[in-house]
Image (cartoon, helix red, strand yellow):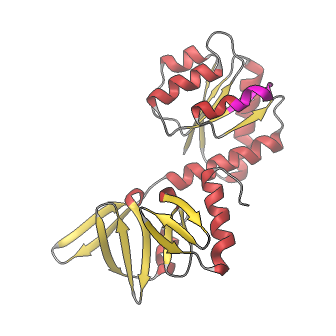
Amino acid sequence: MIKIAIVDDEQQERDTLKGFFGQLSKELHEEMDMKLFSSGEQFLSCYEKEYDLICLDIDMEGRDGIETAKEIRKADGDVLIIFITNMAQMAIRGYEVHALDFILKPVNYYSFAMKIQTAVTMINSQKSRNIVLPTANGMIRFSTNSLYYAEVDGHYIFYHTASGTYKQKASMKELEERLDTLSFKRCNNCYLVNLKYVDGVEKDEVRINGESLKISRPRKKEFMQALANYMGGIAL
């Protein structure tokens, strides 16, 4: 389930966005839980780190959207923020609070759906799973959030994680299927990369945690597009 807050001081705007989220939820077969707030003050008074996405009107009575977002960021550096505004010139201030995007009023469903789908993809890719591996003395468990990349060598997978490197007899195809919908993408046949830890790309190499991994020519376009989608940018 994706948890969403809609903060807007106009009832009609709140209802419109709620309806759009309901329609998109059915189209994506993605369960969405929405809570509506009529002001920045009301939202902040009961704010907890429970939301995946906050849709925030910029031009509100009292505390405006930018100031509300600054307060949110003091408590939560990860939640995605999308501004809803009729002032395009104000939306550029979103960089101050690391906003993902903005949607112009009057909100058009097509534009809304395109931008929210990007947010949904990012939210789902940031969710984690546990991997449990047998060891000589028992077992070890680690979260995919701590996995930098996986490497295949023969019939074995090597998991390069924040706590060390672990080995398992398995195929890369099996691992890809297990990590489907998460933030992992192959940069070549040998490496499955966690896009969360990509520090940069230079020519045909991707940098992860101080290491450089080769990007193969056949996989480069798809890999770069996946990386751009994850970071909320555009692949060039």
In depth, the one of 124 and 209 nearer the eye is 209
Residue furthest to the front in view is 203
Percent of width and height locating residue 168: 33, 79
Q: Is residue 207 above or below residue 151?
A: above
Q: Residue at x 48, y 24 (%)?
A: 47
Outermost left residue: 137
Q: Is residue 182 visible?
A: no
- The residue drawn where x is 29% and y is 66% is 164
Q: Is residue 22 left or right of residue 48?
A: right
Task: Please identify the quarter of the rendering in which residue 163 is found.
Answer: bottom left
**Residue at (76% x, 45% y) in the render:** 113
Quadrant of the snapshot with the C terminus: bottom right
Instruction: Determine the residue positioned at 52% across, 36% down.
Output: 51
Name the quadrant of the N terminus. Answer: top right
Relative vertical location of residue 82 with respect to residue 206 in this rendering, above or below = above
Q: Nearer the viewer, residue 24 or 71?
A: 71
User: Residue 65, position in %: x, y?
Assistant: 64, 22
| Residue with the most extreme top position | 62
The boundaries of the magenta stretch are 83-92
* Image location of residue 162, percent across then percent down: 33, 60
Q: Nearer the viewer, residue 183 or 27?
A: 183
Give the image quarter of residue 152: bottom left
For the residue pair 139 and 202, the one nearer the viewer reads as 202
Percent across and percent down for residue 120 are 62, 48
- Can residue 26 be seen? yes
Please check the rendered image and state whether residue 189 is part of the magenta-colored stretch, yes or no: no
Please state the total of marks drawn on the protein image.
0
90 magenta-colored: yes
